[in-house]
């Protein structure tokens, strides 16, 4: 079987289906996709709202308490308190219905999804203590605005966090403590304003450092101590210089941040972030093999187009986004894991589940088709119970019906069997989901594409402390600041979901005082967007190594060691797929050349 080039139904761009892709589709008995990989990913992300929160009333009978919810009050479906939703006082089977062969499947599925009650937030809420403002999380204690997280204590503001304590304003932080404003940091302690660091402690403004301690403004270091801007210092001189930098001053910190980021650009970046891999392409890949187009994944094998799966392991999956944890044979799935096998075209399917298609928020179940909100069920279609033989016969007829009477959206896109849910069926507007982080577009583009948009509710906060009036140094800030409504520097004029104003929470203020760090001038949303600017797009470009012999291609960086390819001034000929676009300013080396410079 040879490769085939096809045109995406959505963006009209060409994409290639490789022979190994066809083998996978044959294996799981699905037709090849009609959307390109990027459009398929965006279509799945349309079903995930992590941290756009609202207040609304509980819809459960006899309950009218106010909830924190990812579903806005104008959504027409019922929303329950998570503890009630997971209880035994209601039955999602009561919403079951007969399949209607006179209408497309997706019309009927939408009616079911919008009728079945939903929990106001998603996560293991029986395992959480004093962490109400958190979502897609479990095993949290004393946490605030933490999402996509597990086993976190005494922390606030961040996503993709696991086994973390006493840390604030972090993204992609694992096995760490007392850390602040980092992105992609693992197994570290007292790390601040850093990116891509591992097994380190007491770092400030460091990038791609491993096994280091007491370093400032440095990059590409291994097992080093007392370095400032990649220059060694004695312990005494380092401590003296660090004190002179006066990191408690907001103005000093802002100046240093600009200087550090320019310094980082003078050093090479590795083509792909990750380690312990074999035959992989993508970025932020760990302990994986035979995986193509993987992004932010750990322990993934024989898979393609997989992203955000850090709960290991994952095997033999295509077009799979979020979770993992013993997932196998998942195709076109979003937020699926904890023992999942043979799951197709579904979202939020979890805990020892198998043989499920076109379903939403179902757990501990098997053999479901087109179901919503079911737990511990088997052989159900549109939440209606069938015998094993009747189930199989009807599923076969429905798949044929989906071919003969497909769903067609307002833009003329055709959804037959083999397509993930149309985005307009999702319970969220486009700008409420995490699509905006990876593929930002304007409202006009979203509406032109026939998808949903929700204008933010008006914010009429009465700011009591303007950002320019905050004392410059943390030592000059009194406890009274906890009573203030602080204005965000962006004033809502950015595209970062600015809340225009914010409050400090007591544990955050105590942490900043203890660490000697200045108060933030941006709201939590805007701070989050500053951190994820360190994250490259979920997209690959074909490039050549920029090692040009003794120096980098742009002549900025001088190599410190001989490289394998060196023959006088010969440039490296290695080519690779990378998330660094060709027009970006970073110096990008292949793995072999990069490792010669940092080990």
Image (tube, rainbow, N blue to C red):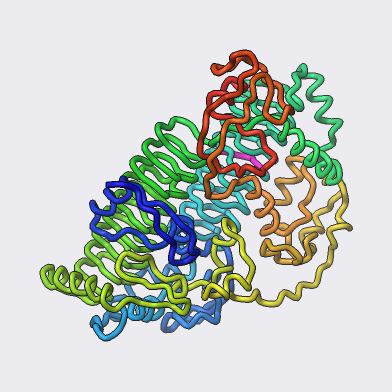
Quadrant for the C terminus, please: top right
Examine the rendering and report whether any part of residue 327 can be seen: no
Mainly helix, strand or loop, the magenta region? strand
**Residue 61 picture quarter:** bottom left
Tell me if residue 177 is in the magenta stretch. Answer: yes
Instruction: Tell me which segment is drawn in magenta.
Output: 176-180
- Specify whether 517 is left or right of 410: right
**Residue at horizontal 59%, vertical 27%?**
210
**Residue at horizontal 33%, vertical 67%?**
359
In the rendered image, residue 512, in percent from the top left (x then y), is placed at 74, 46
In the rendered image, residue 437, in percent from the top left (x then y), is placed at 59, 57
Tell me if residue 125 is in the magenta stretch. Answer: no
Asked if residue 528 is positioned above or below residue 383 in the image, the reply reads above
Asked if residue 254 is positioned above or below residue 483 in the image, the reply reads above
- Specify whether 589 is left or right of 423: right
- Specify whether 391 is left or right of 372: left
Q: Nearer the viewer, residue 497 or 202?
A: 497
Label count reads 0
Name the outermost residue toward the bottom: 102
Q: Nearer the viewer, residue 302 or 146?
A: 302
């Amino acid at each position: 079987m040879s490769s085939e080039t096809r045109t995406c139904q959505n963006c009209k761009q060409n994409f290639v289906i490789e022979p190994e892709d066809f083998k996978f589709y044959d294996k799981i008995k699905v037709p090849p996709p009609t959307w390109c990989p990027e459009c398929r990913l965006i279509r799945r992300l349309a079903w995930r709202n992590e941290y756009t929160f609202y207040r609304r009333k509980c819809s459960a009978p006899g309950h009218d308490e106010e909830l924190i919810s990812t579903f806005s009050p104008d959504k027409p479906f019922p929303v329950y308190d998570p503890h009630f939703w997971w209880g035994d006082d209601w039955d999602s089977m009561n919403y079951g219905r007969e399949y209607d062969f006179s209408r497309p499947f997706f019309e009927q599925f939408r009616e079911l999804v919008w009728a079945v009650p939903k929990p106001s937030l998603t996560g293991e809420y029986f395992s959480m203590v004093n962490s109400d403002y958190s979502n897609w999380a479990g095993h949290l204690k004393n946490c605030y605005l933490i999402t996509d997280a597990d086993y976190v204590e005494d922390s606030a503001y961040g996503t993709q966090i696991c086994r973390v304590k006493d840390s604030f304003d972090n993204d992609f932080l694992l096995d760490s403590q007392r850390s602040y404003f980092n992105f992609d940091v693992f197994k570290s302690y007292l790390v601040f304003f850093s990116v891509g660091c591992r097994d380190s402690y007491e770092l400030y403004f460091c990038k791609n450092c491993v096994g280091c301690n007491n370093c400032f403004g440095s990059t590409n270091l291994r097992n080093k101590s007392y370095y400032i801007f990649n220059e060694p210092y004695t312990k005494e001189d380092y401590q003296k210089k660090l004190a002179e930098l006066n990191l408690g001053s907001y103005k000093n910190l802002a100046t240093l941040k600009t200087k550090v980021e320019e310094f980082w650009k003078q050093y090479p970046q590795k083509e792909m972030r990750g380690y312990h891999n074999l035959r992989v392409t993508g970025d932020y890949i760990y302990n994986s093999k035979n995986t193509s187009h993987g992004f932010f994944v750990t322990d993934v094998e024989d898979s393609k187009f997989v992203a955000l799966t850090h709960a290991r392991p994952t095997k033999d999956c295509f077009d799979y986004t979020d979770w993992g944890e013993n997932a196998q044979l998942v195709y076109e799935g979003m937020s699926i894991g904890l023992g999942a096998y043979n799951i197709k075209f579904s979202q939020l399917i979890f805990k020892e589940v198998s043989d499920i298609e076109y379903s939403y928020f179902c757990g501990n179940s098997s053999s479901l088709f087109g179901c919503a909100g079911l737990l511990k069920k088997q052989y159900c279609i549109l939440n209606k119970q069938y015998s094993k033989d009747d189930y199989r016969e009807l599923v076969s007829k429905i798949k044929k019906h989906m071919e003969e009477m497909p769903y067609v959206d307002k833009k003329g896109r055709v959804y037959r069997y083999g397509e993930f849910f149309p985005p307009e069926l999702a319970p969220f507007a486009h700008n409420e989901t995490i699509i905006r982080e990876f593929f930002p577009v304007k409202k006009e583009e979203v509406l032109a594409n026939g998808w949903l948009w929700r204008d933010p509710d008006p914010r009429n906060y009465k700011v009591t402390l303007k950002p320019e009036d905050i004392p410059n140094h943390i030592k000059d800030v009194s406890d009274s600041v906890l009573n203030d409504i602080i204005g965000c520097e962006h004033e809502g004029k950015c595209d970062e979901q600015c809340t225009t104003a914010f409050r400090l929470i007591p544990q955050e203020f105590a942490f900043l005082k203890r660490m000697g760090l200045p108060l933030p001038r941006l709201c939590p949303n805007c701070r989050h967007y500053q951190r994820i600017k360190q994250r490259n797009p979920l997209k690959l470009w074909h490039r050549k190594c920029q090692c040009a012999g003794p120096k980098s291609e742009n002549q900025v960086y001088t190599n410190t060691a001989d490289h394998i390819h060196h023959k006088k001034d010969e440039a490296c000929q290695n080519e690779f797929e990378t998330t660094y676009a060709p027009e970006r300013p970073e110096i990008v080396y292949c793995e072999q050349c990069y490792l010669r410079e940092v080990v």
